[in-house]
Structure formats: C-alpha cells, structure tokens
Image (tube, rainbow, N blue to C red):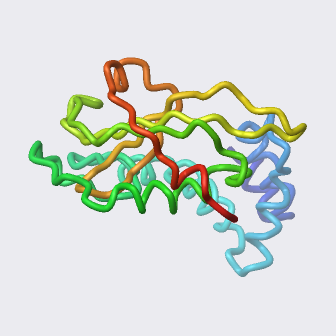
Amino acid sequence: MSDIRSAAIASPVAAGRRFFAPLFANSNLPAERLVSAAVMFGFGALGKYRIRAAIVLLPVVLAGCAASDDVKSITFTEDRGVSNQPFPGNYRAEILAFMKTYLNNPLGVREAAMAEPVQRTVGGRLRYISCLRFGTREADGSYREPRERAVLYVDGRLDRVIENPTDLCAGATYAAFPELEKMTR
C-alpha cells in the first residue's frame, strides 16, 4: 500500500497504472487513459478512486433500474393485458399500408389470399389473428411459392407479422385479396 501512495504522490498516471492494471488486464482500453482523463478534468489523485468506484457501481445501478416488479416487453402498441380485444375494424387498409413497407417489391405479389381475423391464443393471451397467403417476385423475375403469414392485432391495431405461423393459421378459410396484388410503390 505504501508503494501505491508514494507513486501517487510522484505521478498520478503511474499510480493509476498500478491501481487499474488488475481491472483492465484483458481490456483494449488502457487504464492510463482513464487516470489521465481524471487528472486532466481536475479530479487529482482522488480521481482514480472515483473512476474505479464508478466502474464498479455502474453495473449495480443499471441492474437496479432494469429490474422492477412491472417488467414490460417491448411492442409497437401498448398491451392493456385484457382478454376482450376489440375487433380490428380497419384491418384490410392496415395490412395494405404495412405490406408496402414490409415487402421489398410490392409490385410483384400474386396469388394473394386472406382470412378474416379470428381470435386465437398467442403467448397465453387472446388476440385477433388474420392469416395471409401470397407469393412474391424474386430479383430474377421468378415467383416464389405462396407462403402463409399471420398478422397479429393488439387492441384492434396491427402489431406484428409472424413469418411461420404453424398452428395459428390451421383451418383458416382464405378468400381472394386482390388489393394486395394491385399494390404500387
């Protein structure tokens, strides 16, 4: 300990090297830059201790902020957590608007079909699901085989598209969806 104190009096950078070396042994960030920054911003010899304390305490503080009793998942629409979801009244227009941004080439859609929204259990919650089936044009001009996608609604609004709906679209009754085939950029 007396070795570090004498080095701190002689040179804060030298003391910082010894003080931070075990902390940054496998790091790409040199400890002397931190100590030099502490000295440069007027923290003096105590600056290295403040920086070390901040480095040690920062993960603890951030973990405390991240964890809480009201853990929420990230979604486009706020989920009220109610089971009586409203029917998505404007679902055709919402799907068309979303597909313009979702598809790389909205001009190349064919064999488009859609099922009316029905309630299904998704993630333990009752949601409205609308199933889509369509084929898209590849870059070389050929068409892909039509694939199914499920559109999930939360509180009557489009929330997300599920690429591979295994059981969600089982038994869906499809009807032609010509508006999807007539889309423009």
User: Which quadrant would the C terminus be assigned to in this image?
Assistant: bottom right
> Residue sitting at 86 percent across and 39 percent down?
141
Number of marks: 0
User: Which quadrant would the N terminus be assigned to in this image?
Assistant: top right
Question: Residue 71: horizontal and vertical position, in percent?
Answer: 28, 46
Q: Nearer the viewer, residue 80 or 103?
A: 103
From this view, report whether residue 39 is shown above or below residue 24: below
Question: Residue 151: horizontal and vertical position, in percent?
Answer: 41, 42
From this view, report whether residue 181 is shown above or below residue 119: below
Q: Is residue 122 left or right of residue 125?
A: right
Q: Is residue 76 left or right of residue 117?
A: right
Question: Residue 55: horizontal and vertical position, in percent?
Answer: 60, 52
Q: Is residue 170 left or right of residue 43?
A: left
> Residue sitting at 74 percent across and 36 percent down?
22
Q: Nearer the viewer, residue 73 or 179?
A: 179
Residue 167: name its quadrant: top left
> Residue sitting at 71 percent across and 54 percent down?
107
- Direction right: furthest residue: 140
Residue 125: name its quadrant: top left
Question: Residue 4: horizontal and vertical position, in percent?
Answer: 75, 50
- Direction bottom: furthest residue: 42
Q: Nearer the viewer, residue 35 or 129?
A: 129
Q: Nearer the viewer, residue 39 or 180?
A: 180
